[in-house]
Image (tube, grey):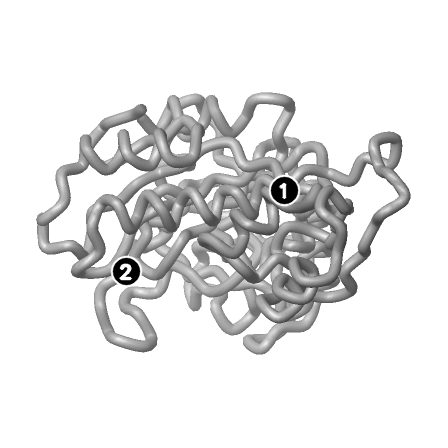
Amino acid sequence: MSAALLDAALLGGTRTIVVVGTAKNAGKTTAFNALRTGAARRGIVGALASLGRDGEPSDALDGTPKPRVRVAPGTLLALPADLVLRSPALRIIDVGEPSALGRMVFARACFAAECEIAGPPTARGLRATIERLAELTPEPIFVDGAIDRVAPLAGGQNQAVILAAGGASGADVAAIAESARSTAARLRLPARDLAREGCEVVVVAGALDARDARDLLAGARPGTTVVVADPTRVTVGGKLLDTLVAAFDLRCELPLRLVACTTSTAGTNGALDPRTLVRAVAAATGLPTFDVVAGLRA
């Protein structure tokens, strides 16, 4: 499944693959590691980056164990100076943007090691970090991401997004599938098409939140084109998002390219059937969906 997931991500000349999650414990880092496993089997080491902080042994909030990020020799990494291993495992190549944990460092792994990775706090810094990695290697860049921080990569023709769908203990199949459907609908917001626009166009500055949505539904003409900067600016979901999409031509200036989903039953105490979950998420999103742990696809 790791190879099949990688194939889905690399279609169309992808250079940057970003994995985002619908919720905590959605299996984001597990999917991120699976992509890298599929690449390694083809002799691709690639480059690694994070839009948050990943690879730590345990969660900073609740102490639960987290998947580690293990790098193979030759892997290129972007990480803050404070997270650089105190060993000869990494050879520093360059330095970049400031971060809360020191300046960003670009390094290559000299031998296999477990690392923590993190990204700079600003959109400009994130964009500059990914661009520098692309300059340093022709191979794919794997990014452990976050939905609210992926905006700097929007609009790129060579990026692909994978959505990890899962939930904490107590979530059922229907709830996870619905969360995936709503999140996917937001991330797949189509690009603005000036040739198809009529005279009624509303450009939303900043976020399109619940209050903006209600104002539009109360005052804008049905069929109006509503434009946001990128899909992450839409902060509503569920039925309210469905109502907006049905009433208006909702579009963005800088789209994202969502190509696949993954599923995870972790955190549910074994209550969910992996096959049922992967099929439900595929049906809800209309996207190829993989469970890289159970070896399933739908």
Label 2 amino acid?
Answer: Lys
Q: Residue at x 47, y 22 (%)?
A: 7
Circles 2 and 1 in contact, beta carbons < 8 Å: no
Q: In screen coordinates, is 39 left or right of 159?
A: left
Where residue 201 appears, as percent x and y from the top left, is 83, 49
Q: Residue at x 18, y 36 (%)?
A: 274
Of 45 and 172, the residue lying toward us:
172
Comparing marks 2 and 1, which lies closer to the viewer?
A: 1
Q: Quadrant of the C terminus?
A: top left
Residue 5 visible from this viewpoint? yes
Residue occupying image coordinates x 68% and y 66%: 215
Figure quadrant of residue 72: top left
Please name the amino acid that badge 1 sits on: Leu
Q: Is residue 257 left or right of residue 55?
A: right
- Position of residue 135 relative to residue 171, above or below, is above
The residue closer to the viewer here, 68 or 112, is 68
Mark 1 nearby-residue class (10 Å; few <14, some 14–19, many ≥20): many
- What secondary structure is found at the residue carrying circle 2? loop
Tell me where residue 87 sits by quadrant. bottom left
Reading the image, the residue beneath label 1 is 189
Reading the chain from its start, which is encountered first: label 2 or label 1?
A: 2
- Quadrant showing the N terminus: top left
Of residues 201 and 296, the one drawn nearer to the viewer in this rendering: 201
User: Is 194 placed above or below 216 here?
Assistant: above
Relative to 117, residue 291 above or below: above
Q: Which residue is mark 2?
A: 66
x and y percentages locating residue 45 in the rendered image = 48, 35
Gap in Å between the C-alphas at discs 2 and 1?
A: 31 Å
* Position of 118 relative to 38 (above/below): below
Disc 1, SS: loop
Q: Residues within 10 Å of mark 2 (few under 14, many from 20)?
A: some
Q: Quadrant of residue 103?
A: bottom right
